[in-house]
Structure formats: C-alpha cells, structure tokens
Image: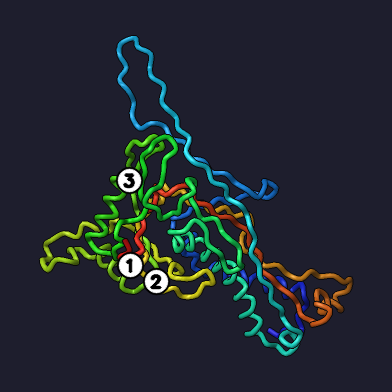
Amino acid sequence: MELNTISLNVFVQLANVIFEKKKDSLDQNARSSGLFKVENIPQSTGNVRQYTEIDLEEYARRKGEDDQSERARVQQGYSKYLNSYRTSMDIGISYEMRTQNKYNDVISRLENLADLAINRMDLDLTHRITFMSATTYTDMDGISVDISTGDTLALGSYVHTLNGSSTTYATRLAGNPQVSKGSLEGMERLNVENSFNQLGQKITIKYDVIFCGDDPNTNNTIDEYLQSSGAPDFNNPNVKNVYNGKFHKVCLPRIATDALGGVDSTKRKYWGIASTMASQAHLGVWEEAHLKSPGVIGSTEQNSDANGEEFSTDAWNFGVRCGYGIAILAGQWIRISSGDGAA
C-alpha cells in the first residue's frame, strides 16, 4: 500500500481495522480469568456503582402443627462503591511516515496503541492481588487507589469482619507457604473453616480456580498437581493424584510487579485459590478500549490529505481511550498466600 496516495478518511478506516485486530489478539489475563465479574455499563447512567451484600440465614426452622412459620433473618453486609476513571494515550503518524511509505512504522504505532489500554486494565486488575496486604496503593500516575474491601480491611487480611456477627474470617493462609500438597490442603481447610454468611453461620463455597504469577517453579508445581494422574509427591504410580483436574489454573503475569509495572521479585511466589461463582470482585466497563481518530475537516477530496493535521507538526494524531472502575466488596471468594513464608 502506498501511504503517500491515501486520504485521511481511508487511512482512518485502515487504522481502525489494525487497532481492532490487535486488540482482539491480546491476552486479557485478569479480565478473562473469572476472578472478576464484568459489568458493561451504559452511557448516561452515572459514573458510580454501589455493591452491597445481603444474606439470609442458612437454615429453615421446625414448624409445629398450626404454628406460624418463623420469618427468616435478613442481614445486610457491607457496601462498596465502584468509581469510573479513564485511561488514554496518544501517538502521532508523522508527515514523513505518510509520504515516504513507512508502512511498518505506521502499523507498529497503531498496534501499540491497542496494547497500552488493554495492558493498563490488566495491570490495574492484577494489582488488587499484588497489593493484597494493603488498603491503598499509589499507582503509576501518582493517584492513591482505594483497594480495601467493604469492611475497610485489606483483601489479604486475617481478621475480616461480618456485619451481623462478631465472627471473623481470614483470606490469607497462615505462614504464607509456597505451593505444595500440604499448602493446597491448608487453602482448602481455610475455605472450609472460614466461610460464613453475615450472621456468622458456616456456608459452602466451591473453589474452582488456582491462580499464580508467572514464576516458572510455581507454575510447574501447580501443573504437576493438576495434570498428573499419579500423586507427584509419591514414587508409587498407583497413588491417585486427588488434585488432577480439580482446579482451573489462571496465570496472572503482572502479579510480581510494582506500581509502575516493573519487576517486583518479592511477589513472584504469590498464589491462591478462588471461586468464580462466588466472586465479589467487580469490573465495571463504561468505555471499552477504542481508537480515537483525527476528524476529516475540509470540503474537497483533493485537500483531504491535509485534513486532521496538527498545525505545528503536520502529524495525524491518533489515541486510545478506555473507561472503567474496579471494586472488591468482600473476600469470602478468595484465599491467598504470598509464598514467602512470612508470618
């Protein structure tokens, strides 16, 4: 394709095709993991959403002959607000790129725009786990982000509270061990003994996901437990591997990162289990990642190559825009270990 003969409106059509193809090819690891419930929010419906827990008691009561049935207790839990914010980035397609047929440079710039928005959403979602021991963190833009749950505690807390009971529960495994048969059983025991409704009654939650970062040792160990027919820690092949197919593994390659997206090796051993059905982590999407293009202004096709140009640079400016919000209401659906043996 000869770029020096293409008009702006045709180029904009081409740019949208390039952008959408690249966006569709990207891995949206956190968003597609099942850990977050995704809600597409219509325009003109406000920029805030509120999520609230409401629980019924767990069991019916005896009813004697002609006795009035008891009315179930209803307990409201905590609430959490999800607020929308936008991310963006712009690039310029220079005059030289257009008139000297630098097609590969143009393609790279437009594809990179798609990367930027999708990667930022993935980073923001993953950092809810990366910073699970904190209630806030400062993101790459210098903004203090509230990542507390509805009880105002950190996602990875040992003492989460309930609104209708003095009972507390933990979402973080004591001792923070690395993945092993013993620690997996510890995670499952944490689920069994720390799952309650707001009245403090034990409930049953099915955990179907095991997640980790991109640490090779952690990934390989998990794969051994999920895929081996025999128990990996026994020499006898007749000993059944009880974890074969029990969970679906999710790799979140941005767990071991700092707020700027750089490597933070202290978090490389993070892992945990989660319930996609019971998840109370919410992603509200106001504005899917999309390409913003220069407008065609002018009245003649002969002059269209000059339309949309930035006056001082002669560049055609393109941008990516995306709008969303993230909130985690409660922690009953997730159990986490930092894998570093910390007390």
Asked if the residues shown at circle 3 and circle 1 are in contact, with their CB atoms under 8 angstroms apart, the answer is no
Q: Which residue was labeled with disc 2?
A: 266
Q: Which residue was labeled with disc 1?
A: 340
Q: Amino acid at mark 1?
A: Asp
Which of 13/180 is in front?
180
Of labels 3 and 2, earlier in sequence is 3
Q: Amino acid at mark 2?
A: Thr
Residue 176 occupies quadrant: bottom left
Judged from the image, the secondary structure of the residue bearing numbered disc 1 is loop
* Image mark for residue 194: 3
Disc 3/disc 2 C-alpha distance (Å): 27 Å
The residue that appears at 56% across and 59% down in the rendered structure is 145
Judged from the image, the secondary structure of the residue bearing numbered disc 3 is loop
Judged from the image, the secondary structure of the residue bearing numbered disc 2 is helix
Disc 2/disc 1 C-alpha distance (Å): 8 Å
Percent position of residue 290, x then y: 65, 64
The residue that appears at 68% across and 84% down in the rendered structure is 1
Other residues around mark 1 within 10 Å, as few (<14) / some (14–19) / many (≥20): some
Q: Amino acid at mark 3?
A: Asn
